[in-house]
Image: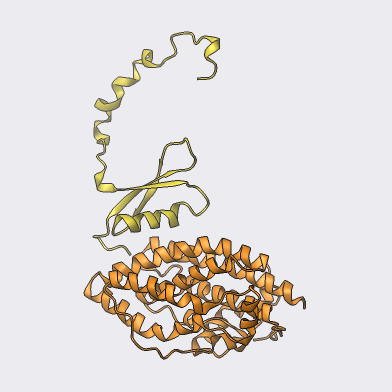
Chain colours: A yellow, B orange
Amino acid sequence: MPTPNTPLWEVFIRSRNGLAHKHVGSLHATDATLALQAARDIYTRRGEGLSIWVVPSNAITASDPAEKGMMFEPAESKIYRHPTFYEVPDEVGHM
Amino acid sequence: MTVANISVSETPLVLYTLRRADDALILGHRLSEWCGHAPMLEEDMALANMGLDLLGQARELYAYAARVEGKGNDEDKLAYLRDARQYRNLLLLEQPNGDFARTMVRQFLYSTFADLYWRAMMRSGDATLAAIAARSEKESAYHVRHASEWIVRLGDGTEESHRRAQSAIDELWAFTGEMFAADDSERGLIEVGVAVDPAGLRAPWLKAVSEVAREATLDLPGNDWMQQGGRDGRHSEHLGHLLSEMQSVPRSFPGAAW
């Protein structure tokens, strides 16, 4: 079992060129090098990745779920912010 | 044991291939014994992954040995229906896992050698062996990195981890000489450019191992007396126990499938 002082890391994997790194999960490791190795062994066993980032979990600042009313609800009523109120000329093609 | 041993016609190329296959299978099996028992989930996965790499190498080598032999044996028969005297693996690889430090030291000593070996075998005149080597080298390169990182952390870690890593090196060192030995059967293949001359790998191996050991504040033993016999089927008592477990199902239920 991981001892309490083994830090937690968040793992991000880029599966293909041109795509962004995507959060896939977390793991325990004593340092960044071992975290990267462990991420390779746990999260890329089925050919999922071309690139791995590991980030100490405690480096992430998260929003507070209790504040979701203040944080996110005001955006729900602003449908005019979606870019659907103008015509896209045909010449532009696929956007 | 209810199923008889097969017999294998050990022509030089069959024997040479079988020795490499046995190395990979026995170490792969040892690593699989950690499954569910490693100190942490992350290493449990890593050890199982590497065990599977080795099992894959063993399968290709057994399949090739069986094809070269041409007597109706196949990879399963070669793995499951030979006893300890017929196994040709290095003594180092059948040594018990012990604690995590001991497993990592065994992994470190062998994979550093294996990576050099595969790299040399990529230039073999035998196209199948060269192709197997090219695939295996990518796997062993990672095994070297994984084990080396752990050796540094165990050696240069706590007093307890240093003590365990150092005692594992002291105990396993006498098994390393066998990696660089070649007998007459193998020498014939070396001369025609099929087999790798292992003697030439000793200096680069020692250099690589010494560099990691230095960083890990571990001492390499000075003793030059080396164990041998694995290549000829003279094994330590541990191999028999390993085989009896690994072979129990195919021996008791021949041809069983699910």
Q: Quadrant of the N terminus of chain A?
A: bottom left
B19 shown above or below A93: below
> Could you say which is closer to the camera, residue B3 or residue B129?
B129
Q: Residue at x 49, y 79 (%)?
A: B93
- Decide: is B209 above or below A48: below
Q: Is residue A93 above or below residue A26?
A: above
Residue at the limit of the structure toward the front, as seen here: B191
- Percent position of residue B220, x then y: 33, 80
Closest to the observer, B8 or A85: B8
Residue A86 horizontal/vertical position (percent): 45, 8
Give x and y (percent) for residue B249.
62, 77
**Residue B204 falls in image quadrant:** bottom left
Quarter of the figure with residue A38: bottom left
Residue drawn at point x = 42 percent, y = 15 percent: A83
Q: Is residue B54 visible?
A: no
In the drawing, does residue B19 fall left or right of residue B47? Answer: right
- Residue A59: percent from the left, percent from the top? 25, 45
Residue B176, can we see it? yes
At 26% from the left and 42% from the top, the residue drawn is: A60
Q: Nearer the viewer, residue B208 or B176?
A: B208
Q: What residue is rendered at 67% in x and 73% in y?
A: B76
Image position of B172 with respect to A48: above or below: below
